[in-house]
Structures are given as structure tokens and as C-alpha cells.
Image (tube, helix red, strand yellow):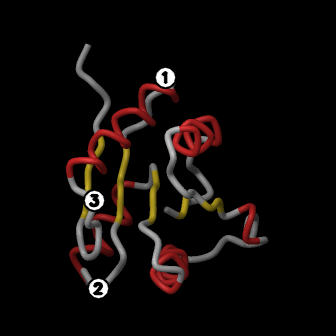
Amino acid sequence: MYSNENFPLPTVEELRRLGHDVMTLFETGKAGQAMPDEEVLAFAHAEKRALITMNRKHFIRLHRKNPDHSGIVVCTFDADFVSLAQRINSTLLDQPDTIGHLIRINRPRQ
């Protein structure tokens, strides 16, 4: 996976602990460059990685415009970062093929 700049690092770390290969925008040297979402998605696709983001609205729109990507995982913000990572992990175990898919991870209702 490739985490967008707005994605919480504690969730990335928990996903890694759960066995996922997650690359961050910061680790690629692209942080702080105000990359357009289209470029972020294209980079993830070129790396054969699903993009994971909190930027739901823009990436859902990009998916609808062009579903030719390695997957987009859009998440609702949850301050319980470990719980968020566990929901992502569980969803990806149930749907390991992300290519061309939009996967929604929602915060549990209170």
C-alpha cells in the first residue's frame, strides 16, 4: 500500500505490524510538495500499490472518473488508530485483490 500524506502514521505503523507493506509519501521524498491527487494515485499505481487515504471525496471522484488503478482504500477518520488498522487489515484479508477497486473503511457507529 501507499499512504497519502494525510493518513495517520500510527495506523501505518500498526498495518506494518500486521504484516502489510506500506510506503508513506514522506518516505518517497514527495511530502510537502502539494502533489495533485491524480499524481499521487498515478505514483501508487506505477508502484503497484493500493492507495490508502482519508481524502475520501477526491479519491472516490477519481475512481469514478478512471478505475484503472491498483486500488483505493478510503477511510473515515478514527482517532483509535489501531482499531482503524485492524478494520483495514480485516477488509483486505477478505478482499486481497484491490486492482481497480474502491474499498471503503468506515468508523464504527457509536
Quadrant in the rendering for residue 75: top left
Within 10 Å of disc 1 (Cα), the crowding (few <14, some 14-19, many 20+) is few
Residue for badge 1: 80
Q: Nearer the viewer, residue 24 or 4?
A: 24
Q: Residue furthest front?
A: 19
Q: Nearer the viewer, mark 2 or mark 3?
A: 3
* Cα gap from disc 1 to disc 2, whole angstroms: 32 Å
Type of amino acid under label 2: Asp
Type of amino acid under label 3: Pro
- Residue found at x 54% / y 64%: 2
* Cα gap from disc 2 to disc 3, whole angstroms: 17 Å
Residue for badge 2: 68
Instruction: Give the SS element for disc 1.
Output: loop
Residue 34: give x, y in percent of width and height: 67, 70
Residue 29: give x, y in percent of width and height: 78, 71
Residue 72: give x, y in percent of width and height: 35, 64
Residue for badge 3: 96
Q: Residue furthest top?
A: 110
Q: Earlier in the sequence, mark 2 or mark 3?
A: 2
Q: Earlier in the sequence, mark 1 or mark 3?
A: 1
Quick check: 56 above or below 65? above
Q: Nearer the viewer, residue 42 or 33?
A: 42
- Residue found at x 49% / y 62%: 1
Instruction: Give the SS element for disc 2.
Output: loop
Q: Which of the numbered marks, if any, corresponds to residue 4?
A: none
Within 10 Å of disc 2 (Cα), the crowding (few <14, some 14-19, many 20+) is some
Q: Nearer the viewer, residue 69 or 34?
A: 69
Q: Could you tell me if the residues under marks 2 and 3 are in contact, i.e. CB atoms within 8 Å? A: no
